[in-house]
């Protein structure tokens, strides 16, 4: 096992939501082609950390224990596709303030712990298809409601079969 862990914070769907997202990925795949994400890898990234020495994982987990964020709901009601990286995804036309507050809290805690992270502006999206042909029309999809009740710290591993994810820790929202 490597001395580095590739990690990120995310919302992780329950089984019912995972099935709804898998159905939506089928519609996006019909519209754009490409490669559907395996259902067990679909998530909403909150904060991407990247590679971190394993011995520093407690420094990342401890500050997350201090986060006191409320539960919130997100309606993912728009399908879109980014041409620059050929990703078809779902997004929310009106993401709730609670989502952005949670992301800011995670950023603040990571900064205070001296842990670097991806500082690009946060754009909530759920990647469902890779290698998509974004020149094609976006399908209309029924909104999918995500009831965010907790968040997780995830480790990503890559091999010849693609990415696999392991949840390292979970925190409840209030």
Image: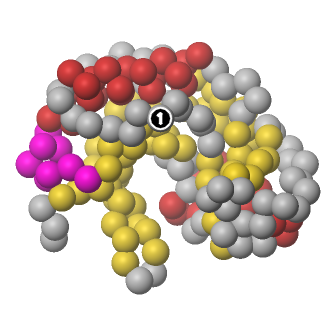
27 lies left or right of 37: right
83 or 45, nearer to the observer: 83
Residue beneath the point at 71% across and 46% down = 90
Which residue lies most toward the left here? 55
Which element carries disc 1, helix, strand or loop?
A: loop
Residue 55, compared with residue 35, is above or below; it is above
Residue 60, image quadrant: top left
As for residue 86 lying within the magenta part, the answer is no
The part of the chain drawn in magenta is 51-58
- Classify mark 1: residues with Cα within 10 Å, few (<14), some (14-19) or many (20+): few
Query: Could you tell me which residue is drawn at 79 percent across and 47 percent down?
Result: 79
Residue 5 rendering spot, x and y as whole percentages: 23, 56
The residue wearing badge 1 is 120
Residue sitting at the far bottom: 160
Q: Residue 126, how many percent across, how many down?
A: 62, 48
| Residue 140 picture location, percent across and down | 90, 48
User: Which image quarter holds the C terminus?
Assistant: top left
Q: Is residue 101 above or below residue 48?
A: above
Q: Is residue 36 above or below residue 97?
A: below
Is-magenta flag for residue 55? yes
* Quadrant that contains the N terminus: bottom left
Chief SS of the magenta region: helix
């Amino acid at each position: 096992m490597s001395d580095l862990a590739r990690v990120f914070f995310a919302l992780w769907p329950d089984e019912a939501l995972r099935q709804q997202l898998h159905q939506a990925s089928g519609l996006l795949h019909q519209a754009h082609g490409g490669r559907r994400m395996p259902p067990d890898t679909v998530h909403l990234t909150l904060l991407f950390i990247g590679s971190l020495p394993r011995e520093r994982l407690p420094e990342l987990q401890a500050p997350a224990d201090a986060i006191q964020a409320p539960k919130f709901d997100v309606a993912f009601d728009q399908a879109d596709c980014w041409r620059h990286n050929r990703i078809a995804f779902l997004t929310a036309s009106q993401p709730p303030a609670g989502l952005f507050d949670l992301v800011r809290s995670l950023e603040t805690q990571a900064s205070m712990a001296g842990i670097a992270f991806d500082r690009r502006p946060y754009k909530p999206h759920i990647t469902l298809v890779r290698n998509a042909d974004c020149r094609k029309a976006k399908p209309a999809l029924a909104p999918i409601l995500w009831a965010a009740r907790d968040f997780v710290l995830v480790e990503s591993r890559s091999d010849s079969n693609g990415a696999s994810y392991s949840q390292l820790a979970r925190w409840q929202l209030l």
